Image: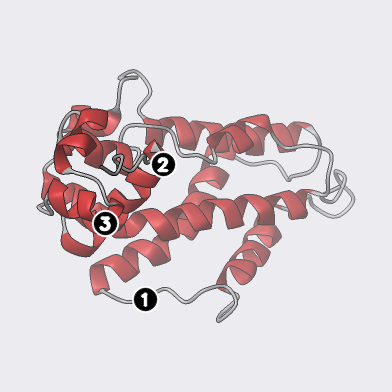
Amino acid sequence: MARPRQVLDEEILVAARACFIEHGASVSTEAIAARLGVSGPALLKRFGTKRELLKAAFSVGRPPPWLPMVEAGPDERELTVQIRELAGTIDAFFREMVPAFAVLREAGLTPEELRGENQQVPAPARASLAMAGWFRRAQEQGKLREGDPSVMASLFLAGIQHRYFLAHVTNQRVPTEAEDPWLERMVDIFWRGVAPEAGHGKHGR
């Protein structure tokens, strides 16, 4: 008799994300399990319920994976290089996550579930605060002009997110950067607004 196939948690989450996005929150655990070649009960043994599996698949209530990168910076490299790096990483996150919003809405997750375990600082708020801290530290290093770092953070994050939300509500596809270097243009325009004024700072270095 063949032994049951062993799958890693990450394999389960990847398959679950794909199934939820393709079929919605109502997709059966059996359909997800079939994609993995395991049984439905074996799948739920790992995560308890389909709702918990959905939350794990989309990291509901958890900080975004790019947060440590923001909290650790900026470093000593040229600032424009770092801003482009951050923009690319955050852009990739939203490219993957925005299609999930319809699934989360359909699932009817509560505000408490979306906020996560840390009720004092919900994940989106923590990410926004961390981004503001990144710009504040860049200012302290003399690499940015004066101005409210929280406004800089809001403009930067909103600029990256906007086209994904627009594509989601209009059911349009967002071109890749290879097809249309939109992100490069956005970062260039953003930098012109926050770069040190002539004769001040280190001009991004």
Distance CA(mark 1)–CA(mark 3):
26 Å
Percent position of residue 25, x then y: 14, 51
Q: In the orientation shown, which residue stands out farthest toward the front? A: 1
Residue 38, how many percent across, how many down? 24, 46
Q: In terms of secondary structure, where does tag 3 sit? A: helix
Give amino acid for label 3: Arg
Q: Can you say whether 11 is above or below 169 in the image? A: above
User: Do callouts 1 and 3 mark residues in contact (Cβ within 8 Å)?
Assistant: no
Q: How many residues crowd mark 1 within 10 Å: few (<14), some (14–19), many (20+)? A: few
Q: Amino acid at mark 2?
A: Glu
| Whole-number angstrom distance, CA of label 2 to CA of label 1 | 26 Å
Q: Nearer the viewer, mark 1 or mark 3?
A: 3
Residue 97 at x, y percent in the picture: 37, 53
To which quarter of the image does residue 192 belong?
Answer: bottom right
Task: Check residue 35 in the rendering and tell me which mark sits there, or answer none.
Answer: 3
For image coordinates 21% across by 36% down, the residue present is 42
The reply to whether residue 109 is visible in this rendering is: no
Q: Pointer 1: what residue?
A: 173
The image position of residue 155, as x and y in percent, is 51, 52
| Residue at image location 43% in from the left, 33% down from the top | 63
User: N-terminal of the two: label 1 or label 3?
Assistant: 3
Q: Answer with left or right where residue 90 lies relative to residue 103.
A: right
Residue at image coords 84%, 39%: 76
| CB-based contact (under 8 Å), mark 3 and mark 2 | no
Identity, as a three-letter code, of the amino acid under mark 1: Arg
Q: Quadrant of the N terminus?
A: top left
Would you name the residue on which mark 2 appears? 10
> Which of the two discs, 2 and 1, labels the residue nearer the N terminus?
2
Up/down of 69 relative to 168, above or below? above
Q: Secondary structure at mark 1?
A: loop
In the displayed structure, does residue 82 sit left or right of residue 116? Answer: right
At label 2, counting other C-alpha atoms closer than 10 Å, the crowd grade (few under 14, some 14-19, many 20 or more) is few
